[in-house]
Image: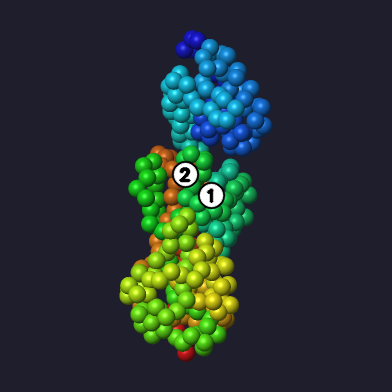
């Protein structure tokens, strides 16, 4: 193939299909990412293999993986596609109007309650901006899954190729229902928690441990309930099933209406950090910059605890 030979859209689509299939590990996965049928992806990759005269994938009925030639070609193709994307970003950086599709992933509860309203308001302001929001507590691989931005709760891993910006910290509150406290008594010190039922947040076998509240070792008995949904955790506490330790924003309404009562206000758990994370690029697109700026500007209000949360119930 000559160096001056023009790459037509069909050839570029074949390369895109090939890279997507390699990243996804299957034609079906690539089809979902590219919004095509599986057969369309297979045909594009087949035409690419025929043109190159090599087999790019070892395919069986159960799985597929790159051949040696496919691995070499994949490395070159990903670099070329990255350079094309960079070139597009450089051109779009000249325009300050947020436009096009912005894919954002975020934890379920804080995403619904705090993050999505900010992004929806941004979309109302910029009619050419299209949003694709995914709500999941799973730690998403932004580059692998093609997301532009992520909101992450908790401490960040040192992941190469990503940039991050702090949105602040989430205050943690310990609380229980008045009915539960009337029956079991109100703990006055962390040591008193040893006599109470704990309702805890946990995900993928890991718990948010209350040792952050300087509890004595004896208090670390097995919790009665472990849930991976903060709203359901609050519901369980409202029903008098035990004591919870959650970010203030998820319990604020229940505390302000008196359905929950804050406990041990003199003891503070370390706050949970909240960050924005996005793939590192030399020229962030206007849509990405606009989303980051909007969320950073809204942080103070998002993470501010109302008076009914900071003031203990008499």
In the rendered view, does 303 fall on the left or right side of 189? right
In the rendered view, does 189 fall on the left or right side of 176? left
Q: Is residue 273 above or below residue 22?
A: below
Q: Give the labeled residue for mark 2.
A: 141
Distance CA(mark 1)–CA(mark 2): 12 Å
Q: Nearer the viewer, residue 60 or 46?
A: 60
Please tell me in which quadrant of the rendered image residue 211 appears. bottom left
- Residue shown at the point (57%, 30%) measured from the top left: 62
- Residue 137 in view: yes
- Residue shown at the point (42%, 56%) measured from the top left: 275
Question: Closer to the observer: label 1 or label 2?
Answer: 2
Q: Say what secondary structure mark 2 lies in.
A: loop
Q: Nearer the viewer, residue 95 or 155?
A: 155
Q: Which colour scheme is used?
A: rainbow
Q: Give the labeled residue for mark 1.
A: 104
Q: In this view, does 110 lie above or below 46?
A: below
- Residue 80 in view: no
Q: Position of residue 248 (x, y in %)?
A: 47, 71
Q: Say what secondary structure mark 1 lies in.
A: strand
Q: Is residue 132 above or below residue 265?
A: above
Name the disc covering residue 167, or none: none
| Number of on-image labels | 2
- Residue shown at the point (40%, 71%) measured from the top left: 221
Q: Is residue 146 above or below residue 51?
A: below
Structural crowding at the residue carrying mark 2, measured as other residues with C-alpha within 10 Å and reported as few (<14), some (14–19) or many (≥20):
few
Q: Where is residue 174 in the image (x, y as percent from the top left)?
A: 44, 76
In the rendered view, does 309 fall on the left or right side of 259? left
- Residue shown at the point (32%, 72%) measured from the top left: 217
Q: Where is residue 291 in the image (x, y as percent from the top left)?
A: 51, 52
* Marked residue nearer the N-terminal end (1 or 2): 1
Q: Where is residue 96 in the image (x, y as percent from the top left)?
A: 51, 45
């Amino acid at each position: 193939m000559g160096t001056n030979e023009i790459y037509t859209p069909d050839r570029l689509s074949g390369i895109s299909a090939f890279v997507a299939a390699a990243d996804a590990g299957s034609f079906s996965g690539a089809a979902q990412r590219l919004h095509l049928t599986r057969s369309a992806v297979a045909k594009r990759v087949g035409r690419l293999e025929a043109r190159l005269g090599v087999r790019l994938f070892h395919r069986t009925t159960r799985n597929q993986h790159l051949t040696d030639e496919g691995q070499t070609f994949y490395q070159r193709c990903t670099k070329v596609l990255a350079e094309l994307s960079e070139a597009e970003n450089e051109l779009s950086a000249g325009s300050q109007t947020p436009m096009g599709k912005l894919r954002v992933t975020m934890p379920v509860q804080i995403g619904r309650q705090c993050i999505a309203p900010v992004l929806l308001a941004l979309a109302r302001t910029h009619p050419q901006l299209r949003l694709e929001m995914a709500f999941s507590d799973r730690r998403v691989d932004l580059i692998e899954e093609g997301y532009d931005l992520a909101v992450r709760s908790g401490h960040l891993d040192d992941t190469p190729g990503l940039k991050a910006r702090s949105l602040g910290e989430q205050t943690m509150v310990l609380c229980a229902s008045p009915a539960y406290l009337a029956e079991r008594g109100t703990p006055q010190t962390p040591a008193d928690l040893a006599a109470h039922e704990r309702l805890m947040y946990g995900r993928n076998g890991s718990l948010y441990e209350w040792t952050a509240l300087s509890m004595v070792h004896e208090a670390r008995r097995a919790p009665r309930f472990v849930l991976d949904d903060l709203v359901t955790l609050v519901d369980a506490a409202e029903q008098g099933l035990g004591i919870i330790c959650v970010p203030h924003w998820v319990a604020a309404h229940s505390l302000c209406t008196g359905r929950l009562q804050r406990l041990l206000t003199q003891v503070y758990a370390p706050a949970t950090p909240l960050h924005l994370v996005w793939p590192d690029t030399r020229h962030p697109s206007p849509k990405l910059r606009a989303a980051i700026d909007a969320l950073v500007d809204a942080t103070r209000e998002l993470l501010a605890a109302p008076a009914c949360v900071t003031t203990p119930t008499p």
